Structures are given as structure tokens and as C-alpha cells.
Amino acid sequence: MVRGECVLLTLRGSSVPFAPGLWHAGAAGKVEPGEELVAAALRESGEELGVRPEPEDLSLRHVVHHTSPAGEWEHAFFVSHRWSGVPYNREPHKHAEVRWWAFGALPGDLVPYCAAALARMRSGESVSRLDGTAG
């Protein structure tokens, strides 16, 4: 979710198994078996933030191919400037906070592949690779 020059991020809770205490993209999650990528992005937006963009309001802006000691993933980052509802933390058992951050003043404690994607999106790159990091 992007509002003006700000992006919505969630702070991962201290007891979650992945990236505890780090900031991450507003809505994130896995694609369910048989689910299309856009449908997953819409579902996760509702589940985590209580908002619903329309499919045509989502723009795939960046893909990170990420390898780490824990495995290998493709992370797709969508941007939406429009949605219905007011974003809030619908999963307090997973997230400690939801906050808007200016692109020029992002927190230093971002999940590494998310930080890389946000930086490269701002420079216009659509695909990147991140190797060997734990996050």
C-alpha cells in the first residue's frame, strides 16, 4: 500500500518464527495451492490489514529471487494506491504494529529482502536477486 510518498509496513511480532522484531511490507504471505498471485495479494491484504484493493489497482512492481541457508524463494511486491477500508492490524498475534513510513526515512530494521525490494522499486528496477542472507 502506498499513500503519496509513504509505504505501509508491519512490524513482525517478537514471538513469530520468521523475522521477529523486523519491519516488513504491509501485507505478505504465501500463495495457496491453486491460488493465483493477484488473488493471494488481495486475500493477504484483507487478512492482515482489513483492506481490499481491486485487482486492477494492483501493480506488480518488483520480484526478488532470494536464496538463504533456509531455502530459496520468489517474493512478488505489488503496489496499490487505492483500496477500500482503513488499514489496521488484523493479526496482532503476528504483528506488533502497522505504520506508514516515508520512502526517504524507512526503518533500518527491515527484513533484508524487503529492504532490497523497496530500494530497487524506487530506482525503477523490476527484478533483483539477494543471495546468502538469513532474512
Image (spheres, rainbow, N blue to C red):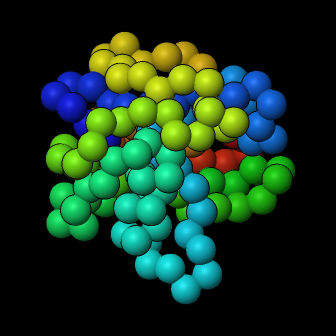
User: From the viewer's perspective, is residue 75 above or below residue 102?
Assistant: below
Quarter where residue 34 is shown: bottom right
**Residue under the point 26% across and 55% down:** 53
User: From the viewer's perspective, is residue 124 above or below residue 112?
Assistant: below
Residue 127 in view: no
User: From the viewer's perspective, is residue 72 above or below residue 10?
Assistant: below
Residue 11 point in image, percent of width and height: 58, 27
The total of numbered circles placed on residues is 0
72 with respect to 70 (left or right): left
**Residue under the point 75% across and 50% down:** 68
Quarter where residue 118 is shown: top left
Q: In which quarter of the image is the C terminus?
A: top right
Task: Depth check: give the residue in front, 62 or 34.
Answer: 34
Task: Depth check: give the residue in front, 67 or 76.
Answer: 76
Residue at the limit of the structure toward the bottom, as seen here: 34
Residue 38 point in image, percent of width and height: 37, 69
Quarter where residue 14 is shown: top right
Residue 84 point in image, percent of width and height: 22, 48
Residue 51 in view: yes
Q: In which quarter of the image is the N terminus?
A: top left
User: From the viewer's perspective, is residue 104 above or below residue 83?
Assistant: above
126 with respect to 114 (left or right): left
